[in-house]
Image: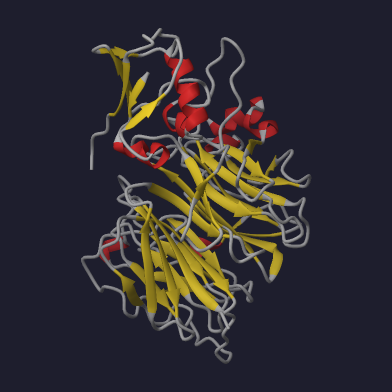
Amino acid sequence: MSQPTGSPASPGETILLIATRKGAWLYFSDAERRAWRVDGPHFLGHTIHHMVLDPRDERTLLVAARTGHLGPTVFRSTDFGRNWREASRPPAFAPAPEGQEGRAVDHTFWLTPGHLSEPGLWYAGTSPQGLFRSTDGGVTWAPASSINDAPQYRQWMGTVQDGTPDGPKLHSIIIDPRDASHLYMAMSGGGVHESTDGGQTFTPLVDGLQVVEGFNPDDVAFHDPHCVRLCPSNPDRLYQQNHCGIYRLDRPSRSWTRIGKAMLAEVGDIGFTMVVHPRDADCAWVFPMDGTSVWPRTSPDGKPAVYGTRDAGTSWQRLDAGLPVSQAWWTVKRQAMSVDAHDPVGVYFGTSSGELWMSRDEGIEWECIARHLPEIYAVETATRAVPA
Amino acid sequence: MKVLIPSALYAYTGGARAEADGETLADVLADLDRRHPGIRFRMIDEQNRIRRHIRFFSENIQICKLDHPLPATGELIIVQALSGG
């Protein structure tokens, strides 16, 4: 991968929002992103699936939490975690009609702030799969019953046994920055879907995607997108890390192209996560994992590496300088990789072994920021203006 | 009645002891939620099912149904039943 160009920029203080199996941590950087001040743990012992800062006000922080004992909820802070308040109505499915078995949210998995023009609007994706909306900054949540209870979507969502080991998940809720009513979302399993009416209705967007051998790709239920990203610099371009490879979609086309075929055969193009450059739609990063035999889901051959493309997936370069050279068997989950807005871009990922890694030069050199955290579920970057 | 709260729910009640009134488990939990908003949903899901790792006991018996009657002067014990690391 070529050296990134551009002079260092300081868009503000960079904050890493780390969600883990046993709590949440915030890492605050200095201007050079060389020193990090850690703040945490927050919610020690809680399972935190996602922590996201609202970019519209740079102060509202939402956390999707549950514990081994207790039901799922959402916590909210407007002072970077000094004080937390619980949602008064967390995401919950509608009560089932008499005589029918209803679904209950096991955990909220994904949080997405709404469009810039819609302050206070948030979306959430849950396990079992459901889409939820809040119009008051995360205080109260309502189910999107037009999807959650639609017979066709329920069929595509499958049952709790059809998803990942800790439950099927609705994730990758994406808002088109040009159009608040244009959304994408994905379900593992259940495919990628597009809405043009603000999430009231969706249609599948799975053409060109492969499914596990022997299954019918025409059945949306068999599609398993792991992570979908929209390019901020070209919102007509989407990338996807799927259970069956890496893909790109250039709208208005509805057919995905498998760009992971250009990866080294011995590494393959299976993984959970993918991130895109904030200003260059040809540039993206993935973290491949071992998807052979029983799916170890570890770094291939115990040699972890990020792979990057600067030509929209025509070619990929191994980016492992600074990473362990052998006997490192961790992986990176679908929400556990993120980028900042600096130039050059900072790339970050958290591992299943509780390590937090960063590159401040777009993947060329890596260094470890933190070790010995619990298993990392999600890494998000946020920016706020440097206090005067 | 007296309600013994597990440590996982102290954030709502401030400690191990709480009070709530009602003729059934459902009533007592509804009153507990009025006094300590949000606590019920952590124990009872949106389909009115007791969550997997929550147990209720009164007068030395486990209560498995929300419509189970409770004595006005008794004690409700809420237990967090978790295993694993």
Q: Residue at x 70, y 50 (%)?
A: A183
Q: Left or right of A363: which side holds B10?
A: left
Identify the image quadrant of residue A143.
Answer: top right
Q: Is residue A305 visible?
A: no
Q: Quadrant of the C terminus of chain A?
A: bottom right
- Residue placed most toward the observer, A104 or A269: A104
A316 shown above or below A138:
below
Q: Is residue A78 above or below residue A68?
A: below
Residue farthest to the left, as pictured: A327
Q: Position of residue B56 (x, y in %)?
A: 33, 20
User: Would residue A4 be visible to someone looking at this image?
Assistant: yes
Q: Is residue A243 above or below residue A27?
A: above
Where residue A119 appears, x then y in whole percent? Answer: 71, 56
> Is A352 placed left or right of A237 in the picture?
left
Q: Quadrant of residue A280?
A: bottom right
The location of residue A218, given as percent across then percent down, is 61, 37
Look at 36% across and 53% down and name the residue there.
Answer: A23
Question: Between residues A26 and A99, which one lies in front from this camera angle?
Answer: A26
